[in-house]
């Protein structure tokens, strides 16, 4: 099978043999995958796959079931599916534990479906499970125009009209509003803490990927019993906090990573997403925000785009694209 290999920080197409699916695994003939920030880190050698996972980059995929391993009965050969992966998405085939696999909603194409698993599972786990978001609460999403941010807005608009985001340009802010945010703060022009203080708005749930200097500000603007959840620290992994806010407002600060979870843990979130988010997609109440799609041969360009941070939403890789 063809797959995307990496040497000296450059991606290139390579060939490898295709292993058989093991116990409880299915084999997917991949049609599409997406670029995630973590892929860029892995390419640079900073984010190796968890033990036992494929060395190939790629945290999600969509495609068609091509083989079913021993003791796997969740899907049949020919089913259209998408999956959350520990690695292996930038390839023509992948073997994956069937608990990590979902059917593709009927109104989503095989290409688009490669954009769904990673951000939807991450948003569901961190907003609904960890932050215990409740209907009509006030939410702040930092990095509103990211793959994660656009997914969070598009899901949450079904549950609250109080979605605030930060983003780094006027164009990004406008797109976030179009997607369903009430207000988008261009953090390069306006201090988000000052905005919330001036407007006397208290935030119930904050999803943060920036870290660093944002911690102090987040604590200040959180409501009583507010929840702050970290999924990354793009600015700085270290931060200073005024602990008094945490005590007096009874705040909960948490965080999580998805990739390192076991198939059983990922499977639990997969089941929740299929139960609660898939119907929104089928009813047209959630649409993925796809910025651009690249053929597998142009994967370096896809990574350059992500590193430029000029994208809004997801960047797709059309694995079958070059064969059309
Ligand atoms: N913990 C988990 O399980 C999990 C799962 C998935 C993703 N993540 C993380 O969540 C983050 C978003 O992922 P993604 O794939 O959606 O990435 P993405 O689309 O590239 O989004 C990242 C965005 O963050 C914004 N940003 C804000 N401050 C930044 C800074 N100091 N440095 C760089 N960018 C900054 C940038 O937009 P502007 O600055 O222009 O607004 C950028 O476009 C990544 O860090 C990723 O690793 C974590």
Image (cartoon, grey):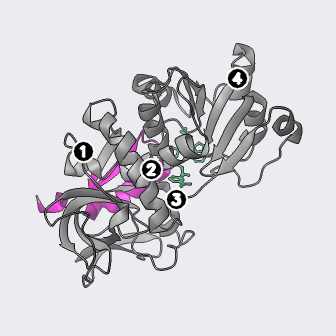
- Label 2, label 1: how many angstroms apart (C-alpha)? 15 Å
Q: Are marks 3 and 2 in contact (CB under 8 Å)?
A: yes
Task: Identify the disc placed on residue 121.
Answer: 2
Task: Identify the disc placed on residue 258.
Answer: 3
- Report the quarter where the N terminus lies: bottom left
Q: Is residue 189 left or right of residue 297?
A: right
- Please name the residue that numbered disc 1 is placed on: 105
Task: Identify the disc placed on residue 202.
Answer: 4
Q: Position of residue 81 (x, y in %)?
A: 24, 57
Q: Position of residue 225 (x, y in %)?
A: 73, 32
Decide which of tag 3 and tag 2 comes sooner along the chain: 2
The residue range painted magenta reads 294-323
Q: Residues within 10 Å of mark 2 (few under 14, many from 20)?
A: many
- Label 4, label 2: how many angstroms apart (C-alpha)? 27 Å
- Label 3, label 1: how many angstroms apart (C-alpha)? 22 Å
Decide which of tag 2 and tag 1 comes sooner along the chain: 1
Classify mark 4: helix, strand or loop.
loop
Visible residue check, residue 67: yes
Closest to the observer: 49 or 317? 49
Q: Position of residue 121 (x, y in %)?
A: 45, 50
């Amino acid at each position: 099978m063809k797959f995307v290999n990496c040497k000296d920080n450059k991606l290139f197409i390579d060939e490898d043999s295709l292993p058989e699916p093991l116990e409880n695994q299915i084999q997917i003939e991949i049609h599409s995958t997406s670029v995630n920030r973590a892929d860029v880190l892995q390419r640079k050698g900073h984010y190796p796959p968890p033990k036992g996972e494929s060395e190939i980059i790629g945290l999600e995929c969509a495609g068609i079931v091509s083989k079913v391993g021993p003791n796997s009965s969740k899907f049949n050969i020919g089913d259209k599916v998408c999956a959350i992966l520990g690695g292996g998405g930038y390839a023509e085939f992948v073997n994956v534990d069937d608990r990590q696999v979902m059917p593709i909603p009927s109104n989503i194409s095989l290409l688009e479906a490669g954009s769904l698993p990673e951000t939807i599972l991450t948003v569901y786990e961190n907003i609904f499970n960890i932050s215990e978001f409740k209907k009509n609460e006030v939410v702040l999403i930092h990095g509103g125009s990211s793959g994660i941010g656009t997914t969070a807005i598009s899901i949450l608009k079904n549950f609250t009209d109080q979605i605030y985001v930060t983003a780094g340009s006027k164009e990004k802010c406008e797109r976030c509003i179009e997607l369903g945010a009430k207000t988008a703060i261009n953090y390069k022009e306006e201090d988000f803490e000052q905005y919330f203080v001036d407007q006397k708005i208290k935030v119930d749930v904050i999803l943060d990927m920036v870290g660093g200097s944002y911690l102090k500000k987040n604590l200040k603007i959180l409501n009583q019993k507010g929840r702050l959840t970290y999924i990354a620290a793009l600015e700085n992994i270290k931060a200073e906090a005024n602990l008094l806010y945490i005590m007096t407002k009874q705040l909960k600060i948490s965080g999580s990573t998805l990739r390192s979870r076991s198939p059983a843990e990922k499977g639990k979130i997969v089941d929740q997403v299929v139960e609660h988010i898939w119907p929104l997609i089928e009813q047209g109440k959630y649409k993925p925000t796809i910025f651009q799609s690249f053929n597998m041969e142009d994967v370096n360009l896809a990574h350059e785009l992500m590193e430029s941070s000029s994208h809004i939403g997801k960047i797709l890789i059309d694995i079958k694209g070059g064969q059309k």
